[in-house]
Image (tube, helix red, strand yellow):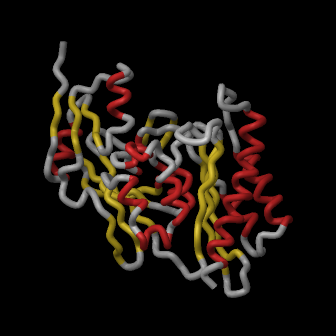
Amino acid sequence: MSQLQYLAPSTIDDAVLALAASGARALSGGTDLLVQLRAGRMAPGAIVDLKRIEGISGIRQEGGAFIIGAATSGAVIGEHAALCRAWPGVVEAVNLIGSTQVQGRATMAGNLCNASPAADSVPALIAARAVCIIAGPGGRREAPVEDIVTAPGRTSLAQGEFIVAFRLPPRPARSSDAYLRLIPRTEMDIAVAGAGVSLTLDAEGRVSEAYVALGAVAPTALLVADAGAALVGGRLDEDSLSRLDAAARAACRPISDKRGTIEYRTKIAGVLARRAAQAAYQRASDQA
């Protein structure tokens, strides 16, 4: 029987070398990885713990943007006052991952790279236009969050690559976001559908920019350009909300399973997109 190696590099370069080995898996929070190991769903040759790398945890601001280290826990994100004010939708999505105990370990990088279609933080990050800062054998590169997951359980990260941090862009005035999901139970369940909306208002209260992303209704989370475009130029009246609803439904490619049918998921995606847009609009309006 082969022995599982545990490696805890202290630099990004050492982590890249360790992950470049065949069969190595990165550990950020471990809330998905350790469960899968215990269940026998994977058998990596090595676990590469990233948490000891300097700068891999924590939140800082650079030129108005927020840089969130890949190993920053959900608990830390939820307690960061400036981030909560600027990106409440991202924070509320991250804080839906698991229980209070899980929040002390779970990370956005792990939630993203686990590559579940129902990952809660992913639609909110996509709507926020978040970018991943990635280290690998070829150096550093950046990629939008929506380009990371390619299929359930699969990502676009090459052997030896890992996410170092997320960058949330600077917030214009009168901007906000929101994330909503539907689950079968009252807490700690997997989303039937989820919707993240980020928008900016002009001085007259009209939507000048909007992004809408959906989760759990396709093999990967979706950025729905038509849904965002439906909101631009209006004040979130019934006409724009109806067009948003229709665009969200049209983008859905769900499956039927024990949590919901194709028809139910599709309808709920439109409802959640509407409600998330209304919540984001109210938050942005409150800044005026």
Residue at (74, 45) in percent of width and height: 268
Q: Quadrant of residue 287?
A: bottom right
Q: Is residue 197 above or below residue 119?
A: below
Picture coordinates of residue 151 (x, y %)? 51, 36
Picture coordinates of residue 135 (x, y %)? 28, 53
**Residue 109 at least partly seen:** no
Residue at (26, 42) in percent of width and height: 160
For the N terminus, the quadrant is: top left
- The answer to whether 147 appears left or right of 134 in the picture is right
Q: Compare residues 21 and 204 and report the one nearer the observer.
A: 204
Query: Which residue reaches farthest top?
Result: 1
For the C terminus, the quadrant is: bottom right
Picture coordinates of residue 8 (x, y %)? 16, 42
Picture coordinates of residue 18 (x, y %)? 18, 39
Query: Which residue reaches farthest right?
Result: 239
Residue at (15, 53) in percent of width and height: 11
Q: Is residue 246 above or below residue 38?
A: below
Residue at (24, 30) in percent of width and height: 22
Q: Quadrant of residue 202?
A: bottom right
| Total numbered labels | 0
- The answer to whether 61 appears left or right of 207 in the picture is left
Q: Compare residues 27 and 16 and report the one nearer the observer.
A: 27
**Residue 278 at least partly seen:** yes
- The answer to whether 61 appears left or right of 47 in the picture is right
